Image (cartoon, coloured by chain):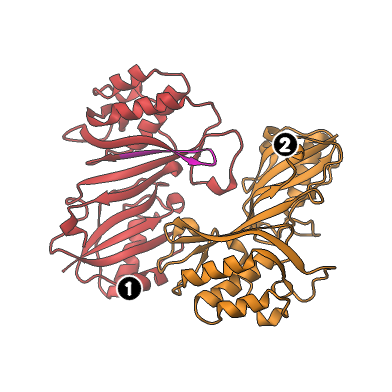
Chain colours: A orange, B red
Amino acid sequence: MTARLEIAYDGGGFAGWARQPGQRTVQETLEDALATVARRPVELTVAGRTDAGVHARGQVASHDGEPQSARALNGLLPDDVAVLRSEGAPEGFDARRDALSRTYRYRLLAREAPDPFELGRALHVRTRLDRPALDACAAALVGTHDFTAFTPTETYHVRFERDVMRAEWGDEGGGVLAFWIEADTFMRRMVRGLVGTMLAVASGRMTVEDFETLLQGRPRDEAGDTAAAHGLYLESVRYLSSETG
Amino acid sequence: MTARLEIAYDGGGFAGWARQPGQRTVQETLEDALATVARRPVELTVAGRTDAGVHARGQVASHDGEPQSARALNGLLPDDVAVLRSEGAPEGFDARRDALSRTYRYRLLAREAPDPFELGRALHVRTRLDRPALDACAAALVGTHDFTAFTPTETYHVRFERDVMRAEWGDEGGGVLAFWIEADTFMRRMVRGLVGTMLAVASGRMTVEDFETLLQGRPRDEAGDTAAAHGLYLESVRYLSSETG
């Protein structure tokens, strides 16, 4: 049997998804709860290995064996991580390999005054932003591009092209702007690099044309900063409908 | 001169609005920042004296003298309180006395699974709720009623009637239901008593008719529990438009 978990977590208190000795990670926290409920070690395969501080609202992970009770798991888990669903999946389902796409959201609090309810939930940007420039950058992202400029130089990849199915900015009210992006897979810090660079464009330090050029495989140091982790959310993962129950 | 402040705070870390010796309160925190910026003591008059743990997204307060810079105040304030606006108001403006109405929102996370992003922001209710019953209670609230059953018995008031202009439940998505209520003034713990009692109705422990009877001035012990503070938000305060700048 194979089981599929849908998970949400506030990344603020975690050193990311992946197990690391001596660090509090989402993977270890969940695997510990699963082991307690299943009374055996359980190993998770995850759709998106989020970095330290990055949030998830619709992370997906798979493990061998029977699905365990979401209620029992939530009873054991700390408050900053929750199992939204735990269910059986087709034999051999693999949350990482079988994912067709991942969707991330990056939230900005784009106004002068801070908001106590967006603390750790959105990046506070006080500079005036050119919204049409943000929209033009997002439009330029759709399609297949080389994202070498948007991932740390030490990262090893066979291929730096990624297929972006959706990229757009939306207004969530209260001064919050959110960038949504769906792609087949993402490289490390790619969304945060894109947002940091779009902020450079939207505040006049770079042009939309510069941004478009960066999408042709320019080196990392030509792009903008990596935006802070606390604005980023893994929102959802898409599978063939036969694999989602 | 008179100044008008619009304020937001996460109530989780405060013993309420009103100054109390030895307690961390919103009033003291704001008055300290104002005194620093204005270089003189500043006394605030507030529209809604929220209880310990209650949040505000559109609290209004007034003080004598020039308005101070919101930016300077936010530079001094801790992260859980923010000044959204600070501006001049008509001479003698009084945030409490001149308010025409206050609007509160109470948020429920009405689903089985917890949500890390609603921790301290919504009351988690796992029991199945009868939404039409909630709507019927809300509809019964509109108009003038005697709210004796919904405020602590030790509270002194000249008059227990309140005029409710708006009362309704809305669906915010993600399992969150929100109760909105606008009235001329509110008595202590009134919204939380109403929500606790509506939850008794929506889970079948009381009828809508019982709820309607309670609105005729029944004693406190006939109503339901006081719902937890962390689900409650003071959303906005209404004034004559000439007083809001």
Q: Tag 2, which secondary structure?
A: strand
Q: Which residue is mark 2?
A: A86
Q: Position of residue A52 (x, y in %)?
A: 69, 62
Tag 2, which chain? A
Q: Position of residue B134 (x, y in %)?
A: 40, 27
- Give the magenta part as a residue range: B171-181
> Seen in the image, is A182 located left or right of residue A43?
left
- Identify which residue, A179 or B111, lies in the foreground: A179
Q: Tag 1, which secondary structure?
A: helix
Q: Which residue is situated farthest in the left direction here?
A: B91
In three-dimensional space, the C-alpha distance between marks 2 and 1, rounded to whole angstroms, equals: 53 Å
Quadrant assignment for the C terminus of chain B: bottom left
Q: Position of residue B7 (x, y in %)?
A: 34, 58
> Seen in the image, is A73 located left or right of residue B9?
right
Q: Main secondary structure of the magenta part?
A: strand
A74 within the magenta span: no
> Seen in the image, is B95 located left or right of residue A155?
left
Asked which quadrant contains residue B29, the reply is: bottom left
Three-letter code for the amino acid on which mark 2 is drawn: Ser
A167 relative to A213, above or below: above
| Residue at the spot 38% in from the left edge and 28% down from the top edge | B135
Q: Can the viewer see residue B86?
A: yes
Asked which quadrant contains residue B81, the reply is: bottom left
| Residue at the spot 68% in from the left edge and 57% down from the top edge | A14
- Identify which residue, A76 or A177, lies in the foreground: A177
- Identify which residue, A86 or A203, lies in the foreground: A203
Q: Which mark is residue A237?
A: none
B161 relative to A185, above or below: above
Q: Which residue is mark 1?
A: B36
Tag 1, which chain? B
Three-letter code for the amino acid on which mark 1 is drawn: Thr
B196 relative to A206, above or below: above
